[in-house]
Image (cartoon, rainbow, N blue to C red):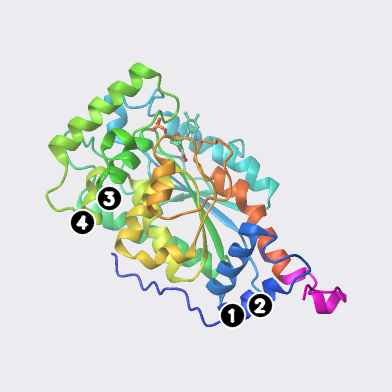
């Protein structure tokens, strides 16, 4: 399921948007990255007066077989326990989403736990966790495809309900390992440079993570280096769902808020399939996870915030959202030299 119809941004409005931005009551370029953001969002929506509606962050949760090999300081059950925390409104993402009136959706992409039905939990479970890719591919091709399609259907639904700006979060103990494997293969970078401390490994833990992932790379790296084959071998259900959700969101010309290391790795797969997706992406922040800076550089991304965050869940996207709102607000509401009767420079 990779047949998404993602079109590069139409630049026909660019001159008019640029003029509108330049004629605001400010020196040229004085609003810095907000100006680039206003131009991008105007082009995404193909209008001089964009609006952001029903901002939503979808948090996908999934478990990783590799977590049982000792690549994270935290046990696998933290994934399902955090899902309950999301449902109870107590996680970091809940706090920032409430602060900025962002809707949160929580999805069971493939958690190794049987949840009792809950009105706010969206059950898209593919399987109770992936296989450990130390021994076999994480997913079958069919499972990977199912994850991508189910997430795409969800995004289509959210779009129908009026959402035009969407961020993605993840929860899955062990998923910084998946992100590192995807990054190494798709950016063609040494694995060592892509592996970080995740939730806080000490030096010894980091060495163990590197040894396990190197062994997995040595024994399981697919001969077929296509993005989908790489995703099914080393990804996770939540990573595949984020990839599918992003592809559908770009097809629907939504504004995509890209969070940290894991969500950027999902985007890496999506952009390998459909490079035009990058036109729709706003990079919220640079995470402290080793590798994220290089991953962003590979995608030629210029993140809005550098706060030293390394939590995931979509928290970087939520914290950056007011900046995105400011870009749209100045474009719509700020006076021009003419309307305010302010003299422009000669
Ligand atoms: C309590 C807690 C809450 C979290 N929220 C996000 N993550 C983050 O940490 C995990 C990835 O790191 P690693 O690869 O080292 O396991 C993911 O679940 C990610 O979302 C959390 C991790 C913990 C422990
Ligand atoms: O960059 C992230 O989003 C991140 C980093 C470490 C752990 N979890 C998430």
Q: Label 2: which residue?
A: 19
In the image, residue 10 sits, relative to residue 158, either above or below, namely below
Q: Which mark is residue 15?
A: 1
In the image, residue 328 sits, relative to residue 258, either above or below, namely below
Drawn side of residue 272 relative to residue 242, left or right: left
Alpha carbon separation for disc pair 4 and 1: 38 Å
In the image, residue 110 sits, relative to residue 146, either above or below, namely above
Alpha carbon separation for disc pair 3 and 2: 38 Å
Q: Quadrant of residue 45?
A: bottom right
Horizontal and vertical percent for residue 196? 38, 31
Residue 342 painted magenta: yes
Q: Label 4: which residue?
A: 226
Q: Residues within 10 Å of mark 1 (few under 14, many from 20)?
A: few
Disc 1 secondary structure class:
helix
Q: Nearer the viewer, mark 4 or mark 3?
A: 3
Q: Main secondary structure of the magenta part?
A: loop
Q: Label 3: which residue?
A: 186
125 vs 69, nearest the viewer: 69
Horizontal and vertical percent for residue 192? 29, 33
Span highlighted in magenta in the image? 332-346
Residue 27 painted magenta: no
41 vs 345, nearest the viewer: 345
């Amino acid at each position: 399921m990779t047949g998404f119809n993602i079109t590069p941004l139409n630049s026909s409005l660019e001159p008019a948007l640029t003029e509108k931005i330049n004629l605001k009551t400010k020196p040229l370029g004085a609003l810095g990255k907000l100006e680039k953001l206003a131009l991008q969002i105007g082009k995404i929506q193909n209008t001089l007066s964009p609006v952001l509606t029903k901002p939503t962050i979808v948090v996908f949760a999934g478990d990783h077989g590799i977590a049982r090999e000792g690549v994270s300081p935290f046990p696998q059950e933290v994934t399902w326990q955090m899902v309950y925390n999301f449902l109870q409104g107590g996680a970091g993402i809940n706090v920032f989403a409430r602060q900025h009136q962002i809707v949160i959706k929580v999805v069971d992409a493939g958690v190794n736990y049987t949840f009792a039905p809950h009105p706010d939990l969206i059950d898209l479970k593919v399987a109770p966790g992936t296989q450990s890719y130390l021994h076999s591919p994480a997913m079958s091709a069919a499972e990977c495809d199912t994850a991508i399609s189910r997430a795409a259907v969800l995004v289509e639904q959210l779009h129908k309900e009026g959402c035009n700006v969407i961020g993605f979060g993840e929860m899955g103990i062990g998923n910084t390992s998946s992100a590192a494997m995807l990054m190494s293969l798709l950016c063609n970078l040494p694995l060592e440079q892509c592996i970080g401390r995740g939730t806080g490994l000490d030096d010894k833990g980091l060495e163990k993570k590197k040894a396990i992932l190197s062994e997995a790379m040595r024994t399981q790296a697919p001969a077929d280096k296509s993005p989908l084959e790489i995703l099914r071998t080393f990804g996770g259900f939540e990573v595949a769902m984020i990839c599918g959700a992003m592809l559908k969101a770009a097809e629907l010309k939504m504004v995509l808020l890209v969070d940290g290391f894991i969500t950027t790795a999902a985007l890496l797969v999506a952009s390998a399939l459909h490079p035009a997706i990058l036109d729709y992406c706003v990079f919220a922040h640079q995470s402290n996870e080793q590798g994220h800076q290089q991953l962003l550089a590979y995608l030629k991304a210029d993140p809005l915030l550098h706060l030293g965050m390394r939590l995931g869940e979509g928290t970087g996207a939520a914290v950056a959202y007011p900046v995105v709102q400011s870009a749209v607000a100045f474009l719509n509401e700020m006076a021009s030299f003419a309307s305010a009767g302010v003299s422009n420079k000669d």
